[in-house]
Amino acid sequence: MSTSTPSDLNRRAKGWTGWVLLILVAVGLIVVGTTRDTGPRTPDERIEAISKRLACPVCQGESVYESRNTASNQIREAIRQGVDEGRLSDEQIIQQITVAYEGEELLVPTGSGVEALAWALPAAAFVLGAAGLVVAFRRWQRSARSLGAATPEDYELVARALALESSEEQQDDARDRP
Amino acid sequence: MPVIAVSLNGALGHAGLLLMLAAAFVGALSTGFAIVVGNRKGIRQATVYAWMILAGALLAVIAMQRALHTRDYSLDYIQKVGSNSTPGIYNVAAMWSALEGSILLWVLVLAGFTAAVAWRFRKRADDPLVAWALVVMFLVCTFFALVSFGPANPFAAGATVPVGFDGRGPNPLLQNHILVLFHPPILYLGYVGFTVPFAFAIAALITGRVGEGWLLETRRWALFSWGFLTIGILLGGWWSYEVLGWSGVWAWDPVENASLLPWLTGTAYIHSVLVQQRRGMLRVWNLSLLVATFALTILGTFLTRSGIINSVHAFSAGQIDGYLLGFFGLVVVVSLGLIAWRGDRLRSPGAIDSPLSREGAFLANNVIFTVFAFIVLLGTVFPLIVEALQDRRTVVGSPYFDRLSMPIGLALLFLMAVAPVLPWRKASTELLRERLFWPAWCGVGALGVAVAVGATGWAPLIAFALAGFAAGSALRQIALATRRQGWRGLVGRANGGMVVHLGVILVAVALVASNAYTESTELHLTVGDPVEWGGHTFELVDIVAETTPRTDVARANVRLDDDRIYGPAITTYLQMGQPIGTPSVRTGLTHDVYLTIAGTNAPVAGSDSAVLEVFRKPLILWLWIGGLLMAVGTVLSAFPGRRRRNPLEPVSAMVPEPVESPVESPIETRGEDVVSGD
C-alpha cells in the first residue's frame, strides 16, 4: 500500500498531531472570540440586562423584561431614565428601583439564609448523582473481577459459535441465490 | 325550544361523564377480579369497558362543544368562557381555556389512549400483563372522570342570566392566534400518553414479569408520547413568541416548567431503556423514571392548577388540589411499594464494564437529566418553601434557571457528541481518537463560523463548538448507516435517534444565539421619517383603527427596508376591556425582526407618531425547523431499521482474521452499532 492513499492520510491525520492541532485551533478561536473588543455597552443593552434581573411586581416568576403590564412598563421607563442619566451603575439603578417600588424583588435567590438552599441543593444533587455513578461502577467492576478473566476455552467457545453462525449464513446466502 | 336544548347539553355531558366513571370503575373491579380468579372470559370483557369509557368521554366532549357552539349560558362554564362574538375556531378552543374544560380534554385524551391500548392488544386481551395494564388505565380514568364529574365539573348549572346575556369569552391571549387550537391538545397527547408505559410498568410489577417484554410492548407508546410532548412544548414556545410581545419563547414560568419536568425524566427514560433492552440492566431505575414521569405530570398539574403558584397559565384556585395531591401521593406510594415488593426479581445480572461505553454515556445522560429535573422542580416550588419557612415573598425567575441550565446544556451537548460513537461494553481511547476526529473538526468549523460572524462570550462559543461536534457525530452515524443500507440507514432507533439529535442541536443553537445576541430598542417613529437601526430601516406609514364587533384594533403600519409593511397592533377586546399587544414579525434565515407597540396605550389613529419596541432575534427560525426535525426523527426511530436482529447474531462486524492471542479481548475494538438500526 502506498503511503499517499486517502485512507492512509486519513489515518495519519487522526494521530496525536492532528488532535493537538485541533485543540490549538479551537483554543485560538475561543480566545479571539472572547477577547476581542466589542465596544462599550449601548444604553439598550444596559436596559435589557437590568430589566432581565428584576421581577415584575404584580406577576410571579416573570421579569420586567418579559412582562407587558403597566407596572413593568413603568419600571422599564424608570430604568431607561436611570441609564440615560448615565451617572449610576447597573447595581445602583437596581438598588434605586427596589427601594422605590414596593414588593419589587430580584429574580435570583440570594446566597444567604434559606435562599442559599436554592444554590446548595442543586450542587448537592449533582455531587450525589456523580458519587452514585462512581459507587455503581466500582461495584460492577468488583463483580466483573470476581468472575475471573476469560479462559482460552471461553474464547474457543465463542469462536466456534461465530463460525457456526457464519457458515449458516453462507448456506442461507447460497440458498437465496438462484 | 331553547330551554330543551339548553338542558340537553348539561344532561348529555353529565351522562357521558357518568358513563365513563361507571365503566372505568366497574371495569377496573371486574377485570381485576377476573384476573385473580382466572376467568378468561371476564378478562376479555376489559375491551368492552374501554370502548364504553371512550364513548362516555366523546359524548361529554360533544356536549361541551355543542354547548359552546349554541352559547348555552345555562352552564356555569359557558358563562365563563363563552361569548357571542368569539369566532368559530377560538370557540372550539375555548373548551380548554379554563380549568374544567382542560380537565375534560385530559379525560378525552386519556379515554382515547385507553381504547387504543385495548384495540392494539385485542388479540392478547387475556394475557394478564395486558389485562393488568388495562386495569391501571381504568383506575386512572376513574380518577379523572371523578374529578371532572365532581369538583371540576364543566356541566355545572350556572346562575340565572338575563335574556340577551353575553359572556366574556376566553382570555384575550387565547383567542388571537391559531396555535391555541394545537398547542394544548398536542401537549396533552404527550402528557397523557405516558400513562400507557406507566400502566404496563405497574402491570409488569404486579404479574412479576419484570423482564424486558413490557418494555418492548410500550416502546412506541413511550416514543410517541415523548414526541408529542416535545412538539407540544415547542408549539407553546412558538405561541409565546407570536403572541406575548416580549419576543421570547421560554420564560421558566411554572406551567412551562410543569411541562418540562416530565419531558426531562421521559427523555432520560427513552435513553436508559436502551440499556435494559440490550443488557437487561437498570430495571429498577427505568421503572422509577417511568413512575417519576407519570407522577410529575400529576404534580405539575397540581402545582399549576391548584392556584398555589400563580402564573400566566394558572386558571383558578383551590378547586381540585386535594384530589390531585392525593392521587399523586397514591401513585408514588403504590409504585414504590410494588418496586420494593418485586425487589428480588428486579435485581439484574451483569455489570457495566466501563464508564467509557454506550451504557456509561446513557448513565451520565440520566444523571444529568435527573439533576436538571430536580433543579427545575426546586426552582418552581422554591417560593413556596421560603413562604412556608419565613412567610415572605420571593421570586425565582429566568436568571436562576438560565444560570443553572447553562452548564447542564453544555454537558448534554458534549455527551451528544461523544455517546453516538461509543460502542457497547467498552471503548479504547484509540477508538475514540479515531471516531471522534472528524466530528471534532466539525465542532471547530462551527466555532470558526461563529467567530467569523462576530459571536462573542465564552459560553455561547463553547456551545456552538459542542453543537458542531455533536452534529458531526450524528452525521457520521447517519452517513455510515446510509452508506451500508441506503435509505434504510435513516430509520431505526439508532439512526432515527441521530435525526432527533440533529433537531435538538438546531434547537440548542437557536436558543443560545437568540438568548445571547438578541438586540432590542425603543424606536420613536414619525410618518415620513425613516429610522435606521440594527441594519434595517423603519418607516411609519400610518396609524389606523380597525373596529369589529369584538375588538378595537390600533395598528401602526411600518414599512421595513423599503419593502413590505408590518403592522404591530394593540387590540382591545370589548368584552374584557384589557388591551393586548399583538406583535408583527419578519422571519428570516439569519434573524427575525420583531415589532411591537411599546407600552399598553394604543396610539391614536390618524396621528403621525408611534413608539415601537423592536427586537432583532438571530436564528430563531431554526428553533422551529429543529422541532420539525425532532418530530421527523421520532417517527423514523419508531420503526425498526433492518429486519429484527437475531439475538444470536454478533452485534458487530466480524474480525477478519482469527485472533492470534486470546489475551486481548476482541470486544474492545468491535461494537460499532451502525448496522443494527434497532
Image (cartoon, grey):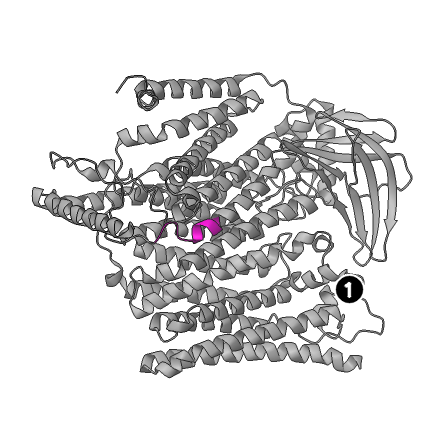
Q: Residue at x 81, y 51 (%)?
A: B572
Q: Position of residue B132 (x, y in %)?
A: 38, 72
- In this picture, residue B487 sits left or right of residue B78: left
The residue under label 1 is B83
Q: Quadrant of residue B593?
A: top right
Front residue of B8/B121: it is B121
Q: Which quadrant holds the N terminus of chain A? A: top left
Q: Residue at x 78, y 52 (%)?
A: B578
- In this picture, residue A49 sits left or right of residue B258: right
Q: Residue furthest right?
A: B606
Callout 1: helix, strand or loop?
loop
Front residue of A178/B412: it is A178
Q: Is residue B344 magenta?
A: no
Front residue of B255/B191: it is B191
- In this picture, residue B280 sits left or right of residue B506: left
Q: Residue furthest front?
A: A178
Q: Position of residue B26 (x, y in %)?
A: 47, 81
Label 1 crowding class (10 Å Cα cut-off): few <14, some 14-19, many 20+?
many
Front residue of B204/B565: it is B565
Q: Which residues are magenta?
A: B634-643
Q: Residue at x 36, y 76 (%)?
A: B126
Q: Disc count in the image?
A: 1
Q: Position of residue B199 (x, y in %)?
A: 41, 66
Q: Chain of mark 1?
A: B
**Which residue type carries mark 1?**
Ser
- From this view, report whether residue B82 is shown above or below residue B514: below
Residue A148 visible from this viewpoint: no
Residue B115 visible from this viewpoint: yes
Q: Quadrant of residue A79?
A: top right
Q: Residue at x 33, y 66 (%)?
A: B204
Q: Position of residue B53 (x, y in %)?
A: 53, 75
